[in-house]
Image (cartoon, grey):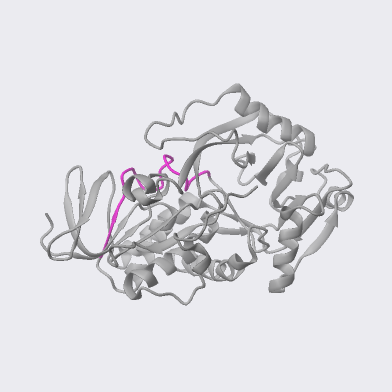
Amino acid sequence: MNSKPWDVIVLGVGGMGSAALYHLARRGQRVLGLEQFDLAHEMGSSHGLTRIIRLAYYEDPAYVPLLRRSYELWRELERDSGEHLLHICGSLDIGPPDNEVFAGSLQSCLEHDLSHEALTGAEINARWPACRFPAETMGLYQPEGGFLLPEAGIRAFVQVACEQGATLRTGQRVLNWQVNADGLLQVSTETETHLAQRLVITAGAWAGKLLPRLGSVALPERQVLAWMQPLDPPNFTPERFPVFNCLVDEGRYYGFPDFAGQGFKIGRYHHLEEAADPDTLDRDCVRDEDRRILRDFAECYFRGGAGPDLLHKVCMFTNTPDEHFIIDRHPEYEQVHFAAGFSGHGYKFASVIGEILADLALKDTTRHDIAFLRSDREMIPLS
């Protein structure tokens, strides 16, 4: 056992945990990050080469102030690390005029005075030749949308954190944690035991296993992504193609331009609605139905998008019933804070979530409005 307690231990060093490590280290904390896999691994939910970031937010306008700060902090990390992580290409939220994807995005822009354009299906198709959406579709274009590089972002957070004195231990699966008789947090892995004054738990799909109270509200789900070689590559570059979310008859999908020759990337929210166990999920098994759902969408709505398959990835969402995040203090142990349920739309917030978790760990308060993300809220499932 390490004889001198750490100021803070961060349990799980993925998207949120790496950001928390960074912010704590920058504030002079003696901080340890424990990660059960390698750094920037593909076993959780913070990978996939690119992740959407957008200011227009149909999920809830209350997220927009957090997003504004998130953009600032991503650019700050770029300066600190020398890495180009945030790529701006615009974002489109597409759907029926009265549906939340379009109407909610428009509302968030109006409430927060965001630059935007409301476009018909015909106008979308004319501006972006790769698109072929129905005439009755509406789209909300927000020019500051784009994408982040998640693996590079995690590495950048950890690089700067370690430069500021943080310690990272990979390959350390946490078995349990408890508060000992001296009031210290005792965290036991398969090979080590550590003591700390405070604990931040950012365990992703494993949150429910380390915090049983989250077992019924932070639910892992199997997700599949596809990358296809565009048949008309110029129309799918970031200079000519935005990131998008869209609601169509087949479901709600999202996608990215072809960045650095990696291919046109698409996914379907909640894919086949299959529950997953992060310890037993078969990440190598991509089924014919997985491919069909994604290819049929690409063939229907994008001219030249459904070329040869380049790559498929099986990963996980970890969803709450209302699909909003959870950020809170443990109800029994004031030294413990946690964050969970980010999948589907969370990675873009990692930079500001790290700041919030550092605030909470050190002061038990934050200037950011996160009251709507408390764990004791009534989590009514979205229809």
Q: Where residue 140 sits: x, y (%)?
A: 77, 58
Instruction: Classify residue 185 by image quadrant.
Output: bottom left
Q: In the depicted view, which residue is nearer to us: 190 or 299?
A: 190
Residue 82 seen from this side: no
Q: Residue at x 44, y 28 (%)?
A: 282
Q: Does the stretch in magenta take in 39?
A: yes
> Is residue 207 rendered to the left or right of residue 286?
left
Please state, as top left, top right, bottom left or bottom right, where the N terminus lies in the image.
bottom left
Residue at the spot 49% in from the left edge and 35% down from the top edge: 275
Residue under the image location 57 percent in, 32 percent down:
311
Say above or below: 248 vs 352: above
Type of secondary structure dominating the magenta stretch: loop
Q: Which residues are magenta?
A: 31-48
Q: In this rendering, is residue 168 above or below 37? A: below
- Horizontally, is 219 left or right of 86 in the view? left
Asked whether residue 210 is drawn in magenta, I would say no
Q: Position of residue 171 (x, y in %)?
A: 27, 43
